[in-house]
Amino acid sequence: MSNKIWLSSPHIGNNELQYVNEAFATNWIAPLGPHVNAFEHGLQEQTKSSHAAALSSGTSAIHLALILLGVKAGDAVFCQSITFSASANPIAYQGAIPVFIDSESDTWNMDPVLLKAALEEAKQNGKLPKAIIPVHLYGMPAKMEDITSIANEYNVPVIEDAAEALGSNIENKPCGSFGEFGVLSFNGNKIITTSGGGALLSENAKMIEKARFLATQARDSAPHYQHSHIGYNYRMSNVLAGIGRGQLEVLSDRVAARRNNFERYKNYFAKHNNAGFNIQFQEEPQGYYSNRWLTCIVVDPTKNKGLTREVIRLAMDEENIETRPLWKPMHQQPIFASSKSYLNGVSDKLFENGLCLPSGSNLTGEEFDRIFNCLDIIFSKHS
Ligand SMILES: *Cc1c(COP(=O)(O)O)cnc(C)c1O
């Protein structure tokens, strides 16, 4: 059997190990230190954000953002429905109530029209949400101008889940810099990784200072351990921040490689689309720039001679090539079955017909040949 081709695997640059060695040589093996400071600085520059706190995960960043916005048990929080569960789980950590919002079909992200309808209804009922969490799915920016202007109209803060979108922007304004808070993830499958990690971004210095305080067990200033808040152990270690510094240096190369993957797939599928198939992609609206973290296709069998996403997924799996259906919407998840949701059918359709293709920045030409050979056989069987 040939080697496994992964959906998205870590891709280490030249300097990560040197930074890690430096942490060992100087004995900075702690959740603070010079690499953490330098990594935070680098993230601020990259995202044009004034302040950043490096944390143990993207999930912990969302959790802290909710806490900092005063989200408490019984409060409502609006969240994009089609996303990874980590966007929604922290709402439940707070005992708050998630309300799920469906997507528009341009970017596959939170639909501003549904958001507006949901906010209006919440206002009529006298119970506006405490926060709104849009997501930039697979690196594609959500319609942030519309979402933030609607949110402002109702005076509800936005937590921007940019976990998949480091390096993406709208008209050169980086993802992560649109909301009250921006959230990044450096999990092993993301465009850059620290093995595990995340960050919270904001223009509000006080909020980020407070995030650091809560993330280090909320220790009051006293010679003994003194606490007047519940704390968390959410800081990023200096060793991992060293990996992050090296990864940040190669981010633009990684974005270029992933965008190149997308073009390669698009050119490949054009051959079949010219022959009567209709494979669709997540297209960039004018002025939008996606890091193309994952290349995804939509295979509607009614427009593709009966060919389904599942046929492709299973045939690829036989060849040891990893693909995956798009995120299963939260409103379809058993754990959130009783949650309120505002739906228009877009995310259901995406989940039914969508497939993520191998998209690592380290994919080789030979691996692409294997992927395209496998696809050639599938399409020839359906011609
Ligand atoms: C990866 C991811 C997260 C969570 O990040 P972790 O660092 O794994 O906790 C949150 N939201 C989205 C959309 C993600 O893809």
Image (tube, rainbow, N blue to C red):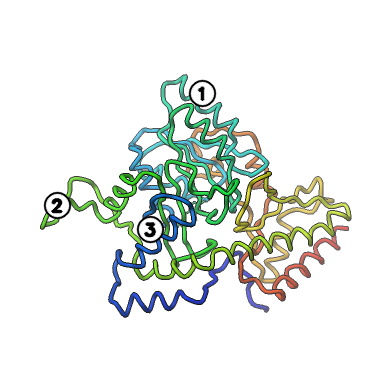
Q: Are marks 1 and 2 in contact (CB under 8 Å)?
A: no
**Total labels drawn:** 3
Q: Which of pointers 2 and 3 indicates the residue nearer the eye?
A: 3
Q: Report the side of 356 relative to 223 (left or right).
A: right
Kind of residue sitting beneath label 3: Ala
Q: Position of residue 356 (x, y in %)?
A: 65, 57
The answer to which image quadrant residue 6 occupies is: bottom right
> Is residue 138 shown above or below 31?
above
| Label 1 – label 2 distance at C-alpha | 44 Å
Please tell me whether mark 3 sits on a helix, a strand or a loop. strand
- The residue that disc 3 covers is 54
User: Residue furthest toward the left?
Assistant: 223
Which residue shows up at 64% across the image and 38% down it? Answer: 104
Q: What is the C-alpha distance between the residues marked 3 and 1? A: 36 Å
x and y percent of residue 166 in the render?
A: 52, 56
Q: Residue furthest top?
A: 124
Quadrant location of residue 316?
bottom right
